[in-house]
Image (tube, rainbow, N blue to C red):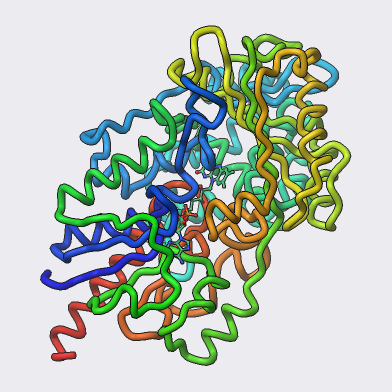
Amino acid sequence: MEGTAAVVGSGPNGLGAAVVLARAGLEVTVFEAAPSPGGAARSSDLLGPGTVVDLGSAVHPFGAASPLFSRLGLHRHGLEWLHPPVVAAHPLDDGPPGLLHRSLERTAEELGPDGRAWSALHRGVVERWEETVESVLGPLVRPPAHPLALAGFGLRAPWPAAATARALFRTEQARGLFAGSAAHSVLPARHVLTSAFGTLFGAAAHATGWPVARGGSQAIVDALVADLREHGGRVVAGTPVTDLDQVRPADVVLLDLTPRQVLGLRGLELPARYRRALARWRYGTASYKVDLLLDGPVPWRDPRVGRAGTVHVGGTLAQIDAAESEARAGRVPERPFVLVAQQGAADPSRAPEGRQVLWAYAHVPHGCDDPVAGERVLAQIERFAPGLRDRVLARVDTPPSRLEAWNANLVGGDIGGGALDGLQQVFRPAVRADPYATGAPGVWLCSSSTPPGGGVHGMAGDHAARSALRDLARRRRSGG
Ligand SMILES: Cc1cc2nc3c(=O)[nH]c(=O)nc-3n(C[C@H](O)[C@H](O)[C@H](O)COP(=O)(O)OP(=O)(O)OC[C@H]3O[C@@H](n4cnc5c(N)ncnc54)[C@H](O)[C@@H]3O)c2cc1C
């Protein structure tokens, strides 16, 4: 199809949208505020020469599972998923850690008395993984492409993760693994629908794994940009868009922005009702990031934890739930839930020989920059890895305000483009038949504030671009 497209913002969704539009034949320009493309999927040598630090996203279960990324064949542009020997570990004060493996059978076997329940909960979703992913990575307001797969998954989804874990599992290992996976939703485990996250992340581990990108998450961005260029598109970096006239004329405009930024754009006439809905949009709990360079491996009390790509540092189910509830209530948790990535377990290129880059963030109250959070992140890791502090060669804390200064979409340090609770779980950013339509002719929203929400998978971009193309074809047919 002939025509021109402008995309504002070059996160994975903006780039995903741009590639879909370029492949459809449009002439695409992506405008990016930052000096380089990639949004929250960029990497740098933040911790010194020879280090590769993922400045935002690190671990990519839904990148590996993304129908868009596989359709595009991003491996042609050098993207390679690397898998750690253990998918995720959940260390505990007492007893061995919970370990999540690619193999469902091995995970179940090691979970002993909870093995059968673990299998029963995940097997059906793993067996219908591709259909499930296509449905959950799409707008839930549309009829699902695979109703049966979604129904199987949906039976488990509505329950709070805490209730599911307590009903099904007896050991803290299984409960912790499930609660840790559910906590990727950035919601307390007592919150409805968190079982959906627990089950989905668990099933993803067994179906596709939770890999990292060889050479840093930046490789995902570089592959998308290469594909865009291959199809005639271009990225104009260092160009914050404040007025839509900067990007016009264009037949379609896609905004990889969150509602607050959309409302701040000049030259965009939105229907009053949609504008009011965007003004009601709620941002969620923030992340406080801590990156460490260590002079060797993390001294985990149980060395098996060192083989995991992801470590859920938060203790028991009850402790994780309490930490998430504290952060939501506006207090820095004494013992925060900390997500740790050890990309080096899969990709030795991340640090100079003998060193290790450790990536971590804790959930803290929205917009809270209190440096005590950084100390508590270290204390939490040290709880399961005594002597960690003695190994630290370099440390960089990135509190919520700095995350937002780096990428305006991370409002108040919310890394998901808006809270994932209440109506916002399904209706992102407003209740409407096409969640990507802004109501302004030719202007579409494609960020993680639209379905399916946060994560590096590009699927919001894919769906938004397809909506835009369908609409453009309709306008052309009707001579508009
Ligand atoms: C610390 C952190 C850890 C994360 N961990 C993971 C993880 O392990 N796995 C995972 O899958 N996901 C993770 N995520 C989430 C994931 O990175 C995001 O959900 C994803 O990047 C969202 O993509 P997006 O395209 O919607 O927006 P973004 O990636 O946020 O990109 C938006 C882009 O728009 C640009 N922009 C904003 N305003 C303007 C403007 N006015 N003009 C021009 N450009 C503008 C920004 O500079 C940015 O480049 C993490 C995020 C963070 C911050």
Picture residue at 30% right of the left edge, 57% below the top? 236
Q: How many marks?
A: 0
Extreme-left residue of the structure: 2
Rendering coords of residue 182 (x, y %): 66, 44
Instruction: Identify the image quadrant of residue 178.
Output: top right
**Residue 342 image offset from top left, x and y in percent:** 57, 23
Give how far across and how far down residue 322 sits, in percent: 85, 45
Tell me which residue sits at (43%, 64%) in the image: 240
Depth check: give the residue in front, 419 or 121. Answer: 419
Residue 224 visible in this rendered orientation of the protein: yes
Q: Nearer the viewer, residue 84 or 352?
A: 352
Query: Which image quadrant for residue 113?
Result: top right
Vertical arrangement, residue 113 with respect to residue 120, above or below: above
> Quick one: 323 or 344, which is closer to the camera?
344
143 over 315 or under it: above or below: below
Q: In the rendered view of the protein, which quadrant contains the N terminus?
A: bottom left
Instruction: Locate residue 94 relative to residue 52 in the image: left or right.
Output: right
Q: Is residue 206 visible?
A: no
Q: Position of residue 329 (x, y in %)?
A: 84, 58
In the displayed structure image, the side of residue 36 where residue 262 appears, left or right: right
The picture quadrant where one finds residue 260 is bottom right
The quarter in which the C terminus is drawn is bottom left
* 98 up-or-down from 61: above or below: above
Q: What residue appears at the point 55 percent right and 19 percent down from the top-left corner?
A: 86
Q: Is residue 130 left or right of residue 309?
A: left
Point 38% across, 45% down: residue: 66
